[in-house]
Image: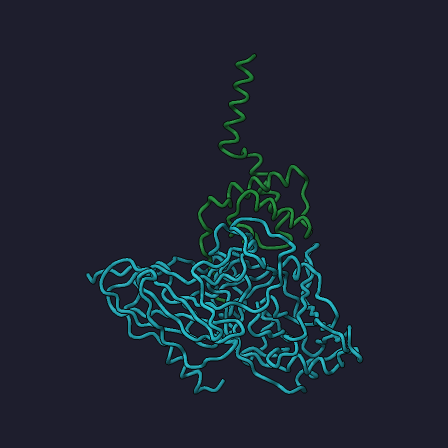
C-alpha cells in the first residue's frame, strides 16, 4: 500500500470535530488480565489458546494493524518456528512429491491481495437462543494486505495429477489430549483462483500468532479456510473428513427453527461469506451531548464487493446512505461514515445495512444455526443524546 | 411414618427447587480445575451462558476430546456450570487483556 492511499483512507475515516462521549459504553479494566505479546488491549475471550476480539474503537483504518487484528485459535499455537528450517510437504496426487522451504516460496512470483478475514463465528453472541462457542460480537474481523505466491504456483512445484478435486492442508498446530488436529480441505476451483495465496507476509510483517511463516489466504471465504502455519499441502480426490470439516464448520442447507438440533444429512460446508456491515463507533450504550456525532463502521461481502451502506437513526423507519471509502474491491471491506446531527435529546436506535455487488442485502433476521455461524443481521446500537447542561 | 415420608418428599422438592447442594457445587468446581484447565483457559468456559442441555452436550463433546471424570464428578461439574453459567445468568462482564506492545 502506498503512503498516499493510506493517508487518503485515514483522512476519510477521521472523526469530524465532535463532542467526546460523556461515558464509555462499557467499563473495562485492563491490567488484571494477561498481556498478549504484540497486541494492544483486546477483548479477551481466552488467553490459552489466545482468542482475542478487536474492540470497536480500534476500527479506524482500512488496513487493520497487526497489533489490533483479532486472533482465533482452536488449539494451542505451535512453538516458535525457525523460518530457516521451515518446510512444507507437497504430497498426495502429485507427480513429484517434495518438501519446499520458505526460500522456495519467496522465489515464486509474489502477489499482494487486500482481503477481509472474518471468523466464521463472528457475531455468535447475537444469536438467541445462545449456542456454545466463543461469544464474539462485532470484532472477529479485520482487513489486511496479504503477500506471497499463488497456491496454484506452489502446486506446480510438485506437478498436480489429473483427477485431484480437493486440496488438503495441515498446519503445525496439534491438538491437546484427544482434540482433533486442525486439517481442512478446499475444492480445486477455489484453490486455483489467482487470489488464493500461500502468504508469507501480512501488512509487510510475519506475525507468528497470525500463522506465519506461511498461511493460506482464501479471499471471501470463512476464516476457518485460512489455515495457519501450513506444513502440508495434499491434492486428493475427496473432501477431508476430519472434525473441522464435518460436523465442524457446516450450516443447515434448509433453515431450522431456532434452538433445534442439526440434521446431519442437511449440513453443508461453509464457503463464501455473506454481506454484512457493522457499526464500530460509537459503542452500544454510548452517551453524547447534543452536537454532531461521528458514526463509523465497516462493510464487507465475502467474494463480492460492497455497493452501498444505509444507516437509520430511528430504528429503521427512514434510511440514509452512508459515505463509503473510495476503493470498491472484491474481498476487501469498505469503511463507511455518517456525521449525525440528532434533532434533540433522547435515546436513538442506530441501524446499518449493506448491499453488495451481487444484490445481496443484509437481513434483519439471519437464520439461526446450531453452531452460531455467519451472523450478518442488520447491525444495531442504542445511544443516548443528552441536553447540554 | 406417613408424616416422615411426606417430610422427606418435601425436603427433596425443596432441594430441587434451590438447585444442587454446596458439596456438589464444590466438587463441580474442583472437577473444572482438574479436568478442564489442563487443556484450556477457564475463560473459554465461563464466558458462555448455556442451558443445562447445552452444557451436558458440551461435556459429552469434551469427553471425546480427552475430558475425563468419574460419573459423580461429571454430574457435579454439570450442576456447577448450570448454577453459575446457565442461560438464565447475566452475560459475562467484558474483559480486556493488558497492553502487550513493547
User: Looking at the picture, how far across and down is residue A5, in whole percent?
Assistant: 44, 85
Which of the image's four quarters has the C terminus of chain A? bottom left
Confirm whether residue B101 shows in the render.
no
Confirm whether residue A345 shows in the render.
yes
Numbered marks: total: 0
**In the picture, residue A104 is in which quadrant?**
bottom right
Q: Residue at x 49, y 79 (%)?
A: A329
- In the rendered structure, the answer to whether residue A206 lies left or right of residue A9 reads right
Q: Residue at x 64, y 81 (%)?
A: A150
Q: Residue at x 34, y 74 (%)?
A: A15
User: Which residue lies most toward the top here?
Assistant: B1
Return the residue nearer the eye: A245 or A320: A320
User: Which residue lies most toward the left here?
Assistant: A389
User: Looking at the picture, how far across and down is residue B61, in whole percent?
Assistant: 64, 50
Which chain has been coloured cyan in this picture?
Answer: A
Q: How is the image coloured?
A: by chain
Q: Is residue A137 above or below residue A88?
A: above
User: Looking at the picture, how far across and down is residue B100, in whole percent?
Assistant: 51, 67
User: Looking at the picture, how far across and down is residue B56, in whole percent?
Assistant: 60, 44
Q: Residue at x 71, y 61 (%)?
A: A241
Which chain has been coloured green in this picture?
Answer: B
Return the residue nearer the eye: A103 or A167: A167
Return the residue nearer the eye: A371 or A262: A262
- In the rendered structure, the answer to whether residue B9 lies left or right of residue A214 reads left
Amino acid at each position: 500500500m502506498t503512503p498516499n492511499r493510506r493517508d487518503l483512507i485515514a483522512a476519510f475515516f477521521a472523526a469530524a470535530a465532535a463532542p467526546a462521549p460523556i461515558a464509555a459504553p462499557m467499563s473495562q479494566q485492563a491490567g488484571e488480565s494477561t498481556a498478549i505479546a504484540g497486541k494492544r488491549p483486546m477483548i479477551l475471550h481466552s488467553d490459552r489458546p489466545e482468542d482475542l476480539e478487536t474492540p470497536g474503537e480500534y476500527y479506524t483504518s482500512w488496513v487493520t494493524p497487526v497489533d489490533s487484528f483479532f486472533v482465533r485459535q482452536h488449539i494451542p499455537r505451535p512453538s516458535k518456528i525457525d523460518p530457516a528450517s521451515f518446510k512444507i510437504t507437497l504430497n498426495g496426487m502429485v507427480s513429484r512429491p517434495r518438501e519446499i522451504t520458505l526460500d522456495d516460496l519467496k522465489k515464486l512470483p509474489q502477489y499482494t491481495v487486500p482481503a477481509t478475514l472474518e471468523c466464521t463465528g463472528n457475531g455468535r453472541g447475537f444469536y438467541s437462543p445462545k449456542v456454545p462457542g466463543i461469544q464474539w460480537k462485532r470484532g472477529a474481523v479485520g482487513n489486511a494486505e496479504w503477500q506471497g505466491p499463488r497456491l496454484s504456483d506452489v502446486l506446480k512445484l510438485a506437478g498436480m495429477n489429473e483427477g485431484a478435486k480437493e486440496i488438503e492442508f495441515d498446519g503445525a498446530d496439534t491438538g491437546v489430549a484427544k482434540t482433533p488436529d486442525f486439517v481442512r480441505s478446499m475444492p480445486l476451483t477455489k484453490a486455483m483462483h489467482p487470489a488464493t495465496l500461500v502468504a508469507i507476509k501480512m501488512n509487510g510483517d510475519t506475525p507468528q500468532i497470525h500463522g506465519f511463516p506461511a498461511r493460506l489466504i482464501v479471499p471471501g471465504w470463512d476464516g476457518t479456510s485460512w489455515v495457519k502455519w501450513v506444513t502440508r499441502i495434499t491434492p486428493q480426490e475427496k473432501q477431508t473428513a476430519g472434525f473441522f470439516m464435518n460436523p465442524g464448520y457446516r450450516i443447515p442447507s434448509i433453515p431450522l427453527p431456532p434452538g433445534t438440533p442439526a440434521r446431519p444429512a442437511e449440513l453443508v460446508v461453509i464457503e463464501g461469506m455473506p454481506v454484512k456491515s457493522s457499526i464500530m463507533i460509537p459503542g452500544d450504550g454510548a452517551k453524547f451531548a447534543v452536537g454532531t456525532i461521528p458514526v463509523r463502521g465497516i462493510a464487507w461481502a465475502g467474494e463480492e464487493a460492497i455497493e452501498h451502506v444505509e444507516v437509520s437513526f430511528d430504528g429503521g423507519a427512514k434510511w440514509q446512505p452512508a459515505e463509503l471509502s473510495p476503493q470498491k474491491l472484491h474481498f476487501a471491506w469498505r469503511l463507511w461514515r455518517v456525521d449525525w446531527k440528532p434533532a434533540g435529546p433522547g435515546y436513538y436506535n442506530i441501524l446499518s445495512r449493506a448491499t453488495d455487488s451481487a444484490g445481496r442485502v443484509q437481513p434483519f433476521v439471519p437464520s439461526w444455526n446450531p453452531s452460531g455461524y455467519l451472523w450478518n443481521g442488520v447491525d444495531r446500537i442504542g445511544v443516548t443524546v443528552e441536553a447540554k447542561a | 411414618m406417613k408424616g416422615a415420608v411426606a417430610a422427606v418428599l418435601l425436603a427433596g422438592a425443596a432441594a430441587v427447587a434451590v438447585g444442587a447442594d454446596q458439596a456438589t457445587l464444590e466438587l463441580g468446581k474442583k472437577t473444572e480445575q482438574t479436568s478442564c484447565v489442563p487443556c484450556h483457559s477457564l475463560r473459554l468456559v465461563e464466558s458462555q451462558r448455556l442451558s443445562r442441555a447445552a452444557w451436558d452436550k458440551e461435556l459429552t463433546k469434551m469427553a471425546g476430546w480427552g475430558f475425563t471424570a468419574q460419573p459423580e464428578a461429571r454430574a457435579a461439574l454439570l450442576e456447577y456450570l448450570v448454577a453459575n453459567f446457565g442461560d438464565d445468568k447475566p452475560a459475562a462482564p467484558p474483559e480486556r487483556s493488558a497492553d502487550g506492545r513493547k
